[in-house]
Image: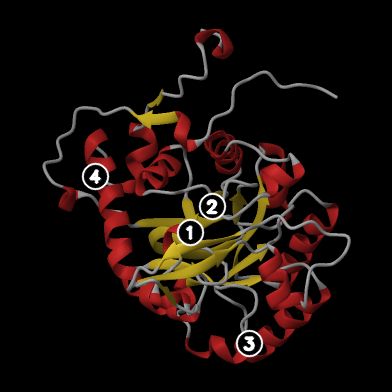
Amino acid sequence: MRIETEVKLDYADVLIRPKRSTLSSRKEVSLEREFKFPHTKKVWSGVPIIAANMDGVGTISMMKSLSKIKILTALHKHHKLTDFESIDKKHTFITIGVREEDKEFLKKYLKKFGEPYLLCIDVANGYTERFVDFVKEVRALLKTSIIMAGNVVTGDMTEQLILSGADIVKVGIGPGTVCTTRRVTGVGYPQLSAIIECADSAHGLGGLICADGGCRSSGDISKAFGAGADFVMIGGMLAGHDEGEEEIIEEKGERFVYHYGSSSVDAMERHNGGKASYKASEGKKIKIPYRGKVLNTVEDILGGIRSACTYVGARRLKELPRRTTFVLVNRQLSPEIIGK
């Protein structure tokens, strides 16, 4: 056993310090970015926000709405093959796990559609040898696909996944709104520090990272980009909309939607026939207000990020990390603890 004494930070522990700016309006800020990837010659451009591969978020309807404004959607793992016939390939991640069923699904997809433009290999624990070997296997099979893989929270595994064939590493264990991994297992890593450390490791190899989970506001998304995230994946912020394709429930004159984690009992019952005896639920179900059309919410989110850029003088989203200075605001972290 060992204890790391260096303080690690979450979004709530910091604010972005304002700086002098030549920008006079949020209209002057561009949120689009262009990326090249280490394992393929493809170039992608758009707004680097990704709708999470969760029930009620990663749907075909969500993809159709968000692709209009060049935002990505990672489809959840439970779509039928025929669902992919009308997708916008450049703004849609096909998501698979590491089970035998996932291998068979990928083979069928390849036979019908060819290599996916974007592929997400998604597991809760990206630290297993099985996962690393699977990423290598998929990269050997797919020569032109942009592959995102995760989740991890440390620099060493970020490097391992990039060297194994991932172009983008998904970063985050336990920060999500409906994720209970930290409480159930005691495992995790403060998300802001995870982004900073993993981004440094990925960029040193020419790879990219996606900050996954923990964003509860547009300010959190801005902090993630400021910390070095290339992409930011959000789930709870996009849940509860028409595009989520979930049942809208009305009680006492109010409408709401249930939102639940991918490792929750509800998800396992819906897709796997129930929770296996050897597993613990690492997610929960919550009620969230019905929010109508998703583009109205996204407009507010993008406006918040543009505003953050104007506060620090970043004319393009790409400039935000260079213009970001974080100020520690959590008063529970005394100067003695942080070594000042």
Nearer the camera: disc 2 or disc 4? 2
Which kind of residue does numbered mark 1 sit on? Gly
Q: Residue 80, labelled with which disc?
A: 3
- Mark 4 and mark 1 lie on one chain; the one further toward the N terminus is 1
Q: Residue at the location (88% across, 60% down)?
A: 278
Q: Residue at the location (69% across, 58% down)?
A: 165
> Which of these two is toward me, 10 or 92?
10
Mark 3, other Cα within 10 Å: few <14 / some 14–19 / many ≥20: few
Report if the CB atoms under discs 2 and 1 are less than 8 Å apart.
Answer: yes
- Mark 2 and mark 1 lie on one chain; the one further toward the N terminus is 2
Rendered image quadrant of residue 240: bottom left
Q: Which residue is mark 2?
A: 177
Q: Which residue is mark 1?
A: 236
Q: How many marks?
A: 4
Seen in the picture, residue 113 relative to 172 is either above or below; the reply is: below
Rendered image quadrant of residue 319: top left
Mark 1, other Cα within 10 Å: few <14 / some 14–19 / many ≥20: many
Report if the CB atoms under discs 2 and 4 are less than 8 Å apart.
Answer: no
> Which of these two is toward me, 11 or 211?
11
Report if the CB atoms under discs 4 and 3 are less than 8 Å apart.
Answer: no
